[in-house]
Image (cartoon, rainbow, N blue to C red):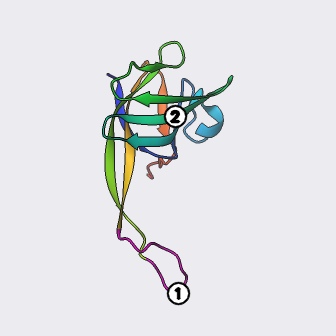
Amino acid sequence: MGLRITRAVNTVVYGGYDLDDKRPNSSFDHRIWIRGVRNHRDRQEGIVNIKTGLGVEEHVIQVGDDPLHFGEDLSIEMVGVRDRIAQAEPYCEVCGRGHSFTDRQTPQAELALNAPRNYRLIRDNARRKSR
């Protein structure tokens, strides 16, 4: 099993051999977009789009299935689903924004990414450390 990473719906992981951390959106070899996560009683699955220079492929990956191979020595595997409880923004009667409920449950995909050591990964929400 490779690197384990947990990602929410509509998040992206950029991967590449010469990935530039200042501009990952234009230097990636693979862009993995977590489009959906489902946590059913009898199965857990994720919907992923993998974009390469050749185009985009969409796959449904399930816990317990064989890893999905993309590229020569790259694979992704659905390991599980984690339910995250997030604080919702309270409803504002003045502006009408927010929610009437206080918490919301958001399923997140637990993934295992297998890649060689010289392959880099960058999350779409990664921040550079300030010095």
Question: Would you name the residue on which mark 1 appears?
Answer: 94
Q: Relative to 47, is 63 on the left or the right?
A: left
Residue at 44 percent of width and 49 percent of height: 129
Residues drawn in magenta: 91-102
Tell me the quarter of the picture where residue 111 sits: top left
Q: Which label is found at residue 48?
A: 2
Could you tell me the amino acid type at mark 1? Val
Q: Would you say the residues marked 1 and 2 are in contact, meaning their CB atoms lie under 8 Å apart? A: no
Residue 40 locus on image (x, y percent) = 35, 41
Residue at 47 percent of width and 32 percent of height: 121
Secondary structure predominantly adopted by residues drawn in magenta:
loop
Residue at 38 percent of width and 45 percent of height: 108
Label 1 crowd bin: few (<14), some (14–19), many (20+), radius 10 Å: few
Q: Nearer the viewer, residue 75 or 118?
A: 75
Residue at 31 percent of width and 40 percent of height: 41
From this view, report whether residue 33 is shown above or below residue 54. Answer: below
